[in-house]
Image (cartoon, grey):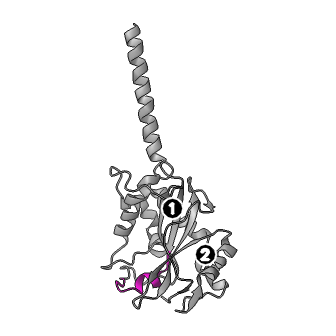
Amino acid sequence: MKIQSNHASLLIKLSTLNFLLVFSASQDFDFFYFVQQWPGSYCDTKQSCCYPITGKPASNFGIHGLWPNRNNGSYPSDCDSSNPFDASNISDLRSEMQSEWPTLSCPSNDGLTFWSHEWDKHGTCSESVLDQHEYFATTLSLKNQINLLHALESAGIQPNGEKYSLSSIKSAIIGASGLTPWIQCNNDSSGNSQLYQIYLCVDSSASGFIECPVFPYGHCDSSIEFPSF
């Protein structure tokens, strides 16, 4: 009887440990980076770009992704190969995604490869709070909450190929959103630094924006171009 009791106790402990390990793995992040990219800067590089098969995207910031991240600066990736991207899960979102989350990679395509990459690498690591449909729907909703282009243009920062101070770009976004952004730059075909991506942070439940606990590594010049598209 004692042996049976000890055996049952051991099974319960092992089961509990297994649950905690799975739960811990599924919760292995502290916040999200919500990343939007400027299409003019994606295309104005030596690599260039290709418009999607639906045509040239609007002259506006497009979604790059919603990326789970940790407070120490590291991040999980490719967390669940058993749950690959399934386009049928987002059939009701396709039109909005083509508009707000367009692909610019070559050769010209319908965006499915881009969205599949975002889900497989980043979305699978947020399964504890967002299923596949919720991951994309939530990201689209975040895009609608803060209009980055309007914030910049309202501060006199136009996508016209002119140079603007990095501090003025940050100030414009802070003034419009109350949030401190992280700005990522790339280089145009002539080697000039230009505004490429803007990072904002979202809490671990993906329910709202927060101040970023940590910023990525990277460097922009003090004055950067904002190219047209």
Task: Say above or below: 229 vs 14.
Answer: below
Disc 2 secondary structure class: loop
Residue drawn at the location 48% of the way across and 57% of the way down: 68
Report x, y in % for residue 25. Answer: 44, 45
User: Few, some or many C-alpha atoms within 10 Å of disc 1 (few <14, some 14-19, many ≥20)?
Assistant: some
Q: Quadrant of the N terminus?
A: top left
Kind of residue at badge 1: Ala
In space, the residues marked 2 and 1 are separated at their CA atoms by: 17 Å
What residue is disc 2 on?
147
Which numbered mark, 2 or 1, is in the foreground of this view? 2
What residue is disc 1 on?
137
Q: Quadrant of residue 114?
A: bottom left
Front residue of 194 and 117? 194
Q: Quadrant of residue 8?
A: top left
Magenta residue span: 37-49
Q: Is residue 45 magenta?
A: yes
Report x, y in % for residue 194. Answer: 49, 84
The tag earlier along the polypeptide, 2 or 1, is 1
Q: Residue furthest left?
A: 107
Q: Residue furthest top?
A: 1
Task: Say above or below: 125 vs 50.
Answer: above
User: Few, some or many C-alpha atoms within 10 Å of disc 2 (few <14, some 14-19, many ≥20)?
Assistant: some
Residue drawn at the location 43% of the way across and 55% of the way down: 76
Q: Which mark is residue 219?
A: none
Kind of residue at badge 2: Asn
Task: Say above or below: 228 vs 206.
Answer: below
Disc 1 secondary structure class: helix
